[in-house]
Image (cartoon, coloured by chain):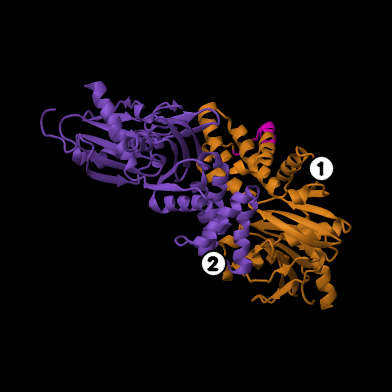
Chain colours: A purple, B orange
Amino acid sequence: MSGEAAYADWIAVDWGTSRLRVWAMSREGVARARASSEDGMNGLARDAFEPALLHLIEPWLGTGQVSVLACGMVGSRQGWAEVPYQPVPCVPGALKPVAVPTRDARIRLFIMPGMSQMTPADVMRGEETQIAGFLTEEPAFDGVLCLPGTHTKWVHISAGEVVSFQTFMTGELFRLLSEQSVLRHGVSRENMDGARFTSAVSDALSRPERMAQRLFAIRAEGVLQGLTPEAARGQLSGGLIGAELAAARPYWLGQQVVVAGAPALAALYVEALASQGATARMLDAGPLTRTGLARAYLTLAETTS
Amino acid sequence: MSGEAAYADWIAVDWGTSRLRVWAMSREGVARARASSEDGMNGLARDAFEPALLHLIEPWLGTGQVSVLACGMVGSRQGWAEVPYQPVPCVPGALKPVAVPTRDARIRLFIMPGMSQMTPADVMRGEETQIAGFLTEEPAFDGVLCLPGTHTKWVHISAGEVVSFQTFMTGELFRLLSEQSVLRHGVSRENMDGARFTSAVSDALSRPERMAQRLFAIRAEGVLQGLTPEAARGQLSGGLIGAELAAARPYWLGQQVVVAGAPALAALYVEALASQGATARMLDAGPLTRTGLARAYLTLAETTS
């Protein structure tokens, strides 16, 4: 590298559907700076990805070339460049970042492949890197990792491999129902009645076939019985998470479970599992993506040096 | 009545969440003219209801006073005036329209009460008038009436009474998922693979606890296995209707069932029921509201004459 030294030895990028987050990384995997924007994949045409990235990382570039490692929906068909999925079973830490050409010669871009499963059909993009980060911290983990979010993933891990996984649209359903359906009038945007949440989880688990009828009952109880917005939020969230737990039972029953997500959401999953007699450990998912990208950077440095 | 004769003897109004439909009626219950607009309850402040109505019915008014009978969300808390629910069990044809004051002296407005049920909590507004219309045509009906729509109702009718009912948000869920979720990229707006619909119904009925996981599989099969948009629509619609049938089983198993709705949607329900060995009769719901309002008009004429 010649000329002015770059502030970042390499750059880590978490590029999802609705957000873009970047970190200026040291060779040792320490984040020196961070930045983010609302330039998620959803709002960008193919040509707009590179400018959106440069807009954030420009201050970290020198005159030499810096590696940029990205994961998430940026690698999907609607992203910057489509990067193939790696089928399970699969070792997350061994996933090979794929080089993608850029116009700006100061960056050398790599995108992480996602993971796929044929039966039942399932895909992930971004979570494979979180899993790699998790296994970097806990290489001997054997059990189930739950990653709650818009599309919650339950991941069965054994001997360092992802054996199988299962996605649930629980987070997206909650958002659509609480913000855009007839229920929006009666569901609190912020506070939740915890007891109502727990009873809704239990009810959904004991009679999962009634899921479809529980939703409108939230509206009716609001109108007829003065159900509070906080109780309505507990009922909706508990009903949806309970239905998810009913379907994901093979993933958590009698398994060692770690729930890694945004703390408030992860806590709900841990609580729901506890109400069913299952103990789960909670982990802040915040650093996992960065750790996973740092692991991939090492692989890259080894193979290209 | 003095002065210029009105074109309508009375006016029937079906005022829902998103649409306003009116008919100029003869004393004998024949529609002489019709009109409609997008002035549904959702878009109107309380003061805007009367102008929205007059905008449509003005040409039908004379110098005298004309009765206007309305049903639907116009009678809800967010409507023109809140009209109380009538609890079940309840005879739909005996529901008493409630007089609501208007500024314009040429109209005398009445709004139909909705129906409510305490356990399990449930409410309807508008469907009670459809049911009254149905029972006007088939007074001896004993069985279950299914009214599919945004919020599908299953109604148990015996000896001319509504004994109980149950609402499912299936229509609203289908719209949100097919138009606003991650599934929107892969679900056809128009055409449906019928075989896929039927298999999705059966699958949902035999394993209703897996509802939450089937949704994302539609996305994954699209990405990995080239699921066509038509098959995706069949899968989504069949999965949701199947989940509804699983929860509504006590309403249709071994019962005499009539499905009254928009023909294309009603046909899906009849087909789904047939795939489970249940025979249902199909009925176009189009005229039911008008017939129900005409029946209420007779009651009104009797009590006010």
Whole-number angstrom distance, CA of label 2 to CA of label 1: 41 Å
As rendered, which of A94 and B10 lies closer to the eye? Answer: A94
Residue in view at x 71 percent, y 66 percent: B114
Which quadrant does the C terminus of chain B fall into? bottom right
Q: Are marks 2 and 1 on the same chain?
A: no
Q: How many marks?
A: 2
Residue A123 place in picture, x, y as percent: 48, 33
Q: Which residue is mark 1?
A: B279
As drawn, is B204 to the left or to the right of B132?
left
As rendered, which of B247 and B4 lies closer to the eye? Answer: B247
Chain name for mark 2:
A
Residue in view at x 72 percent, y 73 percent: B98
Q: Quadrant of residue B153?
A: bottom right
Disc 2 crowd, CA 10 A, few/some/many (<14, 14-19, 20+): some
Is any atom of residue B107 visible in this view? no
Disc 1 crowd, CA 10 A, few/some/many (<14, 14-19, 20+): some
Chain name for mark 1:
B
| Mark number, residue A228 | 2
User: Circle 1 — which element?
Assistant: loop
As drawn, is B21 to the left or to the right of A187?
right
Residue type at mark 2 is Thr
Q: Is residue B190 above or below residue A213?
A: above
Which quadrant does the N terminus of chain B fall into? bottom right
| Mark number, residue B167 | none
Residue in view at x 24 percent, y 24 percent: A302
As rendered, which of A93 and A144 lies closer to the eye? Answer: A144
The residue range painted magenta reads B189-198
User: Circle 2 — which element?
Assistant: loop
Is any atom of residue B236 visible in this view? yes
Q: Quadrant of residue B59?
A: bottom right
As drawn, is B161 to the left or to the right of B233?
right
Q: Is residue A6 above or below residue A263?
A: above
